[in-house]
Amino acid sequence: MPADHAAIPSAVADPAADAAAVAPRGAADLIDGTAIAAGVRGQVAGDVAELRERGLVPGLTVVLVGDDPASALYVGAKEKASRAAGMASETVRLPAGTSQAQLLALVEQLNVDERVHGILVQMPLPPQIDPDTVIRHIRPDKDVDGFHPVNVGKLLIGHTDGFVPCTPLGVQRMLAHHGVTVRGADCVIVGRSTIVGKPMAALMLAADATVTACHSRTRDLASHTRRADILIVAAGRARMITADMVKPGAVVIDVGMNRVAHAGAKSGTRLAGDVDFDAVRAVASLITPVPGGVGPMTIAMLLTNTVRAARRISGQTGIA
């Protein structure tokens, strides 16, 4: 599964704790995204409670077109998390045959609905609908996914009043949580999607890292990844980063989420990242597991963006 779908909820109760229990001596410490996300959600719940006392209930509406099982799973996790935080959460489910005009009409209704502060149209969309057209119709101040050109532009020029895509924002929060020095660090990002790679590069540049963006046409990928103090992988290829491609002591962030064959699993498959976790853990200083790493942070940052949207739209900016 592509790295851009890293928001999939973990099927393991506490994978980071499980991995830590079997960690070999000298292995990298784990960046426990599940635990960090729980802290973010707790902060969001506190902010929502304060806003409710002021008469404002942050509202998030997710639109799902069609019946793609993975998309339905993501949407369910987002709805559950937003309700747990005390938000007003709604999922609008439309049939796969919905026309682009019908979807745009719904988006326009949500744009003017004062109860809705965040709008998220779940990707992918059916082939008859152009995703860029839909994204451009979402009000930028309700675009909690951070994909509207206005928000993308604000990120690139360094303005902080827009919305940043949730997965890169979650990675940034994880690095900060562990006190990773970004300023002056060599940061290599593998993957150049508009959902992860490109906004991640912009965030790291804004934090004064020296950034190299690699992709499917990069020559001698290993020569780049071996220089990285911080290696962020979002390419959508299972276990493509091996131990010999990683600088000793590097911080490794694995955004990938792939299904691979596994005879011991009831389903016959298991989740794997873009990094060969066991081998790379012996080389790195910090590493994210899959699942239980970046994925939980994606949903947590969606909640954070929704609270920010509610405060800005309502003018209640007193809560940080």
Image (spheres, rainbow, N blue to C red):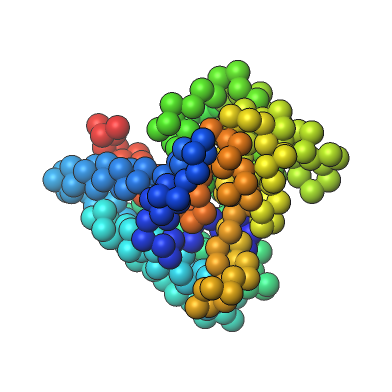
Q: Is residue 256 left or right of residue 75?
A: right
Q: Looking at this view, name the residue that lies furthest to the right.
A: 219
Q: Is residue 257 visible?
A: yes
Q: Looking at this view, name the residue that lies furthest to the top.
A: 184
Residue 270 drawn at (x, y percent): 55, 67
Vertical comparison of 114 with 231: above or below:
below
In front of the other: 20 or 167: 20
In front of the other: 227 or 277: 277
Query: Which residue is at 26% across, 58% downward?
Result: 84
Q: Looking at this view, name the residue that lies furthest to the left.
A: 53
Query: Which residue is at 45% across, 41% downward?
Result: 31
Query: Which residue is at 43% across, 65% downward?
Result: 11
Residue 307 drawn at (x, y percent): 33, 45
Number of labels in the image equals 0
Query: Which residue is at 66% across, 64% downward?
Result: 130
Q: Is residue 191 visible?
A: no
Res 54 → quadrant: top left
Residue 186 drawn at (x, y percent): 65, 25
Vertical comparison of 319 with 109: above or below:
above
Q: Quadrant of the C terminus?
A: top left
Residue 106 drawn at (x, y percent): 47, 67
Q: Looking at this view, name the residue that lies furthest to the front.
A: 25
Q: Quadrant of the N terminus?
A: bottom right
